[in-house]
Image (tube, helix red, strand yellow):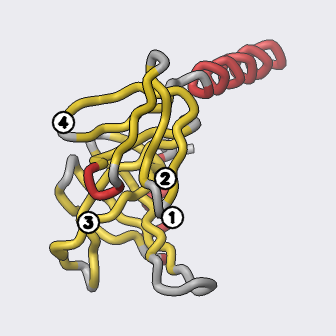
Amino acid sequence: MKKLIFVLFCCLIGMGAVMANEPDYVISDGNVYFVESLRVSPWNGFSGKSEGERLRFKSSEVEGYSKDGVVYRRLPVIVGNKVTDRTALMQALAFRGGYIIYRYTSPSGLYNKEVQYFVFKDKDYVLTVDYSLSKQMAMYFSYGK
């Protein structure tokens, strides 16, 4: 039993090491641009180097990006369980069966940022995760652990 736990622990560490080596990328105009050391700035947008060439992207043109293994995707903002015309970059947290749970931090104030969790299937809004659903969602996305 101890050997099995040790082997599983080593596999988890190995998977974490592989995931940490994922390259940073930006998706813009339907193209994926792999960059070294992606920098994200609210004023200057996105920038990085690719094969010695400096690439810059406006924030409004970016459809998604990955920085240090954390994936963000541009999705519609949800207000009152309804899809709005606005979009924002949301952080992908977990994926299972085509459903992805995203964290959206609304810029409502300097110190009063509201964090919301949404489930999407591709770009289609499914539901808002609130406290009453959190245990069921955690069980679903953690594969029943």
Query: Of circles 1 and 4, which is in front?
Result: 4
Q: CA distance from mark 1 to mark 3?
A: 28 Å
Q: Residue at x 35, y 55 (%)?
A: 59
Disc 3: CA contacts within 10 A as few (<14), some (14-19) or many (>=20): some
Name the amino acid, label 1. Lys
Are the two marked residues, 1 and 2, in contact with CB atoms closer than 8 angstroms? yes
Earlier along the polypeptide chain: callout 1 or callout 3?
3
Q: Residue at x 27, y 47 (%)?
A: 63
Name the amino acid, label 2. Met
x and y percent of residue 11 in the render?
Answer: 66, 17
- Above or below 12: residue 67: below
Instruction: Identify the residue position indicated by label 1 in the image.
Output: 135
Instruction: Identify the residue position indicated by label 3 in the image.
Output: 87
Q: Quarter of the image holding residue 8?
A: top right
Q: Residue 139: which disc?
A: 2
Name the amino acid, label 3. Thr
x and y percent of residue 29 in the render?
Answer: 19, 40
Is residue 64 visible in the rendered image? The answer is yes
Q: Quarter of the image holding residue 54?
A: top left
x and y percent of residue 40 in the render?
Answer: 51, 50
Q: Residue at x 39, y 55 (%)?
A: 101
Q: Nearer the viewer, residue 3 or 79?
A: 79
Disc 4: CA contacts within 10 A as few (<14), some (14-19) or many (>=20): few
